[in-house]
Amino acid sequence: MEQHEFRAYIESNQVALEYPSLRGVGFVERVNRKNIQDYVALQRRELIPDFAVQTQGDLPDLFVIKFIEPLTNNRSLLGLDLGFDAARREAIEQAIDTGEATLSRRIDLAEGGVQRPGFLFTFPVYENGSRPITSAERRAALTGVLFTPAVVDEIMADTVGAAQGQAAFALYDAAAEPSAPGPTSEGLLFDSSAAA
């Protein structure tokens, strides 16, 4: 798949119109760390002359952003290894192994130097649209993973507007502190009274 084909697919599905709170839609490829130099050389020949992989750590497999739309707002993300972060890696690997769409646990999304709580939605893509049965078959047939980051307060904005001040609610991530007996400030993702 080429960048222009990916762009055409995203535009033809009117993702930005139907889901305006999404930051973009991207495609990641799994790259073995030993093959980074060859992968970068290929992307520079076929995609962008200054393509570079941005990663941290030393895990053997990287999940590198190959395409993202809209490119104008997200160009700096090309080459980013989403597998550097445990929550993102966990969601990607769960999607690959189950063959199902997966929502990450809370992640922080940066914009203009501000960290905002959000999620990463992931969906695996297998060779020739196949539907492998086992986890091992899925890993072998993987082409890549579609993803989209979503900021919680942007997703919730319509809900707050619909409530018209008649209801107050908060959204918590129970996984933030699983041993806590109830909601904690650490797990707070969204508070409608703060958004009003």
Image (cartoon, helix red, strand yellow):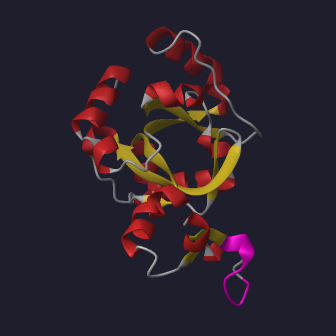
Rendered view: 5 above or below 103 = above
- Does residue 97 appear in this view? no
Q: Residue at x 59, y 27 (%)?
A: 76
Residue at 63% x, 24% y is 36
| 62 displayed left or right of 153 | right
Residue at screen point 55% across, 27% down: 78
Using the image, determine if residue 129 lies above or below residue 37. Answer: below
Give the side of residue 120 with respect to residue 175, left or right: left
**Image quarter of residue 87:** bottom right
Please identify the dominant SS of the magenta region: loop
Residue farthest bottom in this picture? 181
Task: Examine the structure image and report whether residue 186 is included in the region drawn in magenta.
Answer: yes
Stretch in magenta: 179-187
Quadrant (top left/top right/bottom left/bottom right) for the N terminus:
top left
Q: Is residue 95 a member of the stretch shown in magenta?
A: no
Q: Position of residue 149 (x, y in %)?
A: 50, 48
Instruction: State the residue at coordinates (52%, 51%).
Output: 92
Which quadrant holds residue 56?
top right
- Compared with 184, 18 (above or below) is above
* Residue 37 rendering spot, x and y as whole percentages: 64, 18
Residue 51 can be seen in this image: yes
Specify whether 69 is left or right of 116.
Answer: left
If the image is split into quadrants, where does the C terminus sit? bottom right
In depth, the one of 97 and 51 nearer the eye is 51
On the image, the x and y values in percent for residue 144 come to 43, 39
